Amino acid sequence: MFGAIFTGVSDIVSGWFSLKKSQLQTQRDIEANKSRLALSTESNNSAWEMADLANSDKWLKRILTALIIWPIIHCNFDAAAVAQYFSALANSIPGWWLSLFILIFSNVFGISPMRNSILSIIAAAKK
């Protein structure tokens, strides 16, 4: 019994330490990139490069996730109200507005994270 408890606690502690280690590595990478950009005369030294490295859009992701999850949670308590809400929403929102929301949503969750991966793959391929 104590072995299972100890194993569970050690897994939690080791996970916490690995999270802190990855956060520290990210901070080191940010500082190294800031130094590189400050010394470089060829780069644009844009603030978005730092924000992209620091994952500054996490609150935007949390808000969009809450917008998607809230009706699912509310549906467990009052399904008729959620159905009425979505039917009224579907009849009143113009198509361009829905398309714009889908574009923003896909950019935040799909294209932006993939951009970092694709750029790192391209940089590795150039070496």
Image: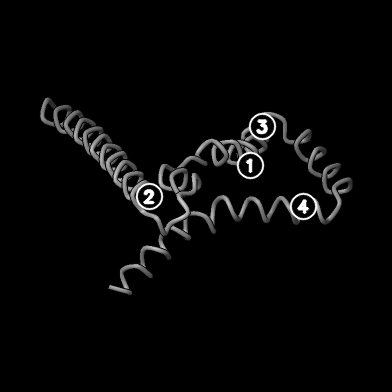
What separation in Å lies between label 3 and label 2 (alpha carbons)?
A: 47 Å
Q: Secondary structure at mark 3?
A: helix
SS at circle 4: helix
Q: Which mark is residue 98?
A: 4
Q: In front of the other: label 3 or label 4?
A: 4
Q: Secondary structure at mark 2?
A: helix
Q: Residue furthest front?
A: 41
Q: Residues within 10 Å of mark 4 (few under 14, many from 20)?
A: few
Answer with the quarter of the image where residue 121 lies: bottom left
Marks 2/4: CA–CA distance: 39 Å
- Three-letter residue code for mark 2: Leu
Q: Tell me what residue is drawn at x 45 percent, y 49 percent.
A: 45
Nearer to me, 68 or 102: 102
Instruction: Decide which of tag 3 and tag 1 comes sooner along the chain.
Output: 1
Q: Residues within 10 Å of mark 2 (few under 14, many from 20)?
A: some
Q: Compared with residue 43, is residue 73 higher up or lower down, i.e. above or below?
A: above
Label 1, residues with CA under 10 Å away: few <14, some 14-19, many ≥20: few
Question: How far separated are the C-alphas under marks 4 and 1?
Answer: 14 Å
Q: Which residue is mark 2?
A: 37
Q: Are marks 3 and 1 in contact (CB under 8 Å)?
A: no
Q: Amino acid at mark 1?
A: Ile
What label sits on residue 74 in the rendered view? 3
Q: CA distance from mark 2 to mark 1?
A: 38 Å
